[in-house]
Amino acid sequence: MAPPKTKEEALQQMRLIWLAFLVSVLLYLYIGYAMPPFPWLEFRHAQATISVLSVLDLVNFVWFRVKRFPSALQSAQAQPQDIHAIRRWMIEWIILITLAEAEALFGILIQWGQNSQEAIPFYALSFVLLLSLWPRQIVASGNRTSGYTS
């Protein structure tokens, strides 16, 4: 995918990426049930290890969403015609969406470790986080108070 040249092109690319990530969670769910489990995922503390990694990923997601992403969004709102500000916003959004996607990957690892029912919350969390990241149109910060429109 070529780097976007306009705000509208960036938004279009982000929505396409968002859809691909959302569909991939459903594919992970299917793959988890269709493929046989890997024997190396059956070590003694596999589920605890994967769960801790999942929690750390979630903490990283929340930290990034609260600390890093708002500054990129504010920069894009303040300078909606500056492509560098728009690209920074897009890159930080991509980082967020990959952190959300990682939760589904932890789910597939739990599922392959012979715990199918315990993997469902990981898939659900990933799906909800991805739904919350729907890319919305940026409006200049002087035009609206929220800075977003659907």
Image (cartoon, rainbow, N blue to C red):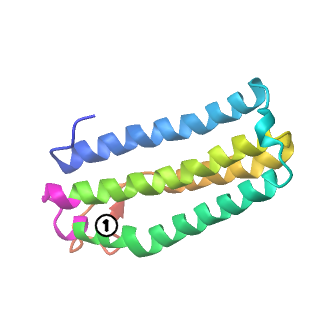
The percent coordinates of residue 124 (x first, y second) are: 69, 49
Quarter of the view holding residue 142: bottom left
Residue at 61% across, 48% down: 127
Tell me the quarter of the image containing the N terminus.
top left
Residue at image coords 55%, 34%: 23
* Residue of label 1: 73
Q: Is residue 82 left or right of residue 99?
A: left
Query: Magenta residues: mostly which secondary structure?
Result: helix
Q: Quadrant of the C terminus?
A: bottom left
The image position of residue 74, as x and y in percent, is 28, 71
Residue 143's place in the image compared with 3, above or below, is below
80 drawn magenta: yes
Magenta stretch in the rendered image = 76-85
Mark 1 falls on what kind of element? helix
Q: Residue at x 50, y 72 (%)?
A: 63
Q: Nearer the viewer, residue 23 or 117?
A: 117
Q: Nearer the viewer, residue 52 or 67?
A: 52
Q: Is residue 86 left or right of residue 26?
A: left
Amino acid type at image mark 1: Leu
